[in-house]
Image: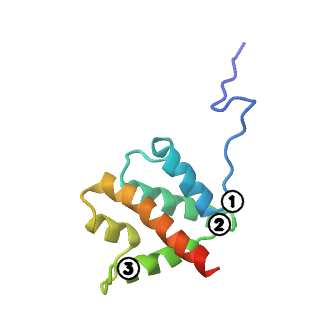
């Protein structure tokens, strides 16, 4: 007789994310569950894969949110060269793991500003 193994208990359904903000909140709570290392480059790679999957399956997943955050980061740090949000944050951080922590702080700061405008 073959025993069936579930990664998630039958009583607890897996989290379903409908927005980038929900996904990022889950990653912030438990980064090791989503990222191989607590590095901003791992977050960037994870999100790139997430958006590719969403695009492949026609899932609307508010990708423009990250584009707006990118514009905000560029303006905040007065960047004139073409650099992505992850590289900009890493440049101004001590190391990869500090940059990941800084990302969440900056993302929340950006969100607060967006919510004030709404």
User: In the figure, is residue 48 to the left or right of 38?
Assistant: right
Disc 3 secondary structure class: helix
Q: Which mark is residue 76?
A: 3
Q: Which residue is found at the position 39% from the left and 83% from the top?
A: 75
CA separation in Å, label 2 and label 3: 25 Å
The percent position of residue 63, horizontal first and vertical second, equals 58, 71
Q: CA distance from mark 2 to mark 1?
A: 6 Å
Q: Is residue 88 left or right of residue 68?
A: left
* Residue 49 percent location from the top left of the image: 52, 59
Quadrant location of residue 102? Answer: bottom left
Q: What label sits on residue 18 in the rendered view? A: 1
Image quarter (top left, top right, bottom left or bottom right) of the N terminus: top right
Residue 23, relative to residue 108: is it above or below? above
Quadrant housing the C terminus:
bottom right
> Which circle marks residue 61 in the picture?
2
The answer to whether marks 2 and 3 mark residues whose Cβ atoms lie closer than 8 Å is no
* Residue that appears at 72% across and 34% down: 12
Residue 76 horizontal side relative to residue 13, left or right: left
Q: Quick one: 58 or 46, which is closer to the camera? A: 46
Q: Would you say the residues marked 2 and 1 are in contact, meaning their CB atoms lie under 8 Å apart? A: yes
Which residue in the rendered view is the most extreme toward the top? 1
């Amino acid at each position: 007789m073959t025993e069936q193994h579930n990664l998630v208990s039958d009583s607890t359904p897996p989290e379903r994310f409908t927005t980038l903000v929900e996904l990022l909140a889950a990653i912030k709570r438990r980064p090791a569950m989503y990222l191989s290392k607590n590095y901003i480059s791992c977050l960037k790679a994870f999100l790139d894969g997430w958006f590719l999957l969403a695009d492949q399956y026609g899932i609307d997943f508010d990708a423009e949110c990250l584009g707006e955050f990118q514009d905000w980061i560029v303006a905040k740090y007065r960047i004139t060269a073409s650099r992505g949000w992850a590289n900009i944050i890493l440049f101004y951080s001590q190391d990869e793991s500090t940059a990941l922590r800084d990302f969440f702080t900056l993302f929340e700061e950006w969100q607060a500003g967006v919510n004030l405008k709404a």
